[in-house]
């Protein structure tokens, strides 16, 4: 896996959605951040999310997850950032700043704030690519 978003473009993945230059501020609640629905054409599709969380005050909560349906129809929710960062700094989503999977046609991929940020401040920057 590459941490270079240009690698996604060169592999045929197109940018579907992103959080924009301002990022997405985590809240004391849960929320959907960005989403994409794969074409309903009977084929398996691929997505990659690239991003990071910038923590400016020590976090309590703030877990980031991605929900999707595997090509065999099995629903899946995967934690890609556990939140609760005990120090300020920038933390990549997934094990290396990205997360990729194949999904079933016609199903939705949703990047979510999975747990409330009950203390601290953090902003997530993310881009979703798909094909």
Image: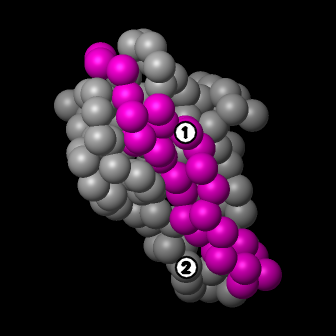
Horizontal placement of 124 versus 100: left or right? left
The one of 5 and 112 positioned closer to us in this rendering = 112
The one of 70 and 17 positioned closer to us in this rendering = 70
Please identify the residue farthest to the right as the structure is shown: 72
The magenta stretch is 56-84
Name the spot of residue 12 as percent of width and height, x first.
63, 49
Name the spot of residue 94 as percent of width and height, x first.
63, 37
Q: Quadrant of the N terminus?
A: top right
Task: Please indicate, yes or no, whether residue 48 appears anywhere in the rendered image.
Answer: no
Q: Quadrant of the C terminus?
A: bottom right
- For disc 1, the marked residue is 81
Numbered label tally: 2
Residue drawn 70% across the image and 56% down it: 101
Residue 121 part of the magenta segment: no
Horizontal placement of 38 versus 118: left or right? right
Name the spot of residue 20 as percent of width and height, x first.
26, 38
- For disc 2, the marked residue is 107
Residue drawn 54% across the image and 27% down it: 92
The one of 124 and 121 positioned closer to us in this rendering = 121
Dominant SS type (magenta) = strand
């Amino acid at each position: 896996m590459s941490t270079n978003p240009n690698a996604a473009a060169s592999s045929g993945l197109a940018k579907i959605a992103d959080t924009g230059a301002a990022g997405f501020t985590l809240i004391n609640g849960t929320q959907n951040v960005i989403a994409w629905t794969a074409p309903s054409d009977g084929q398996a599709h691929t997505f990659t999310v690239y991003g990071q969380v910038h923590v400016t005050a020590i976090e309590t909560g703030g877990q980031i997850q991605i929900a999707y349906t595997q090509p065999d129809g099995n629903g899946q929710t995967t934690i890609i950032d556990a939140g609760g960062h005990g120090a300020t700094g920038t933390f990549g989503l997934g094990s290396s700043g990205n997360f990729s999977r194949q999904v079933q046609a016609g199903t939705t991929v949703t990047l979510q704030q999975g747990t409330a940020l009950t203390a601290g401040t953090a902003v997530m920057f993310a881009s979703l690519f798909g094909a």
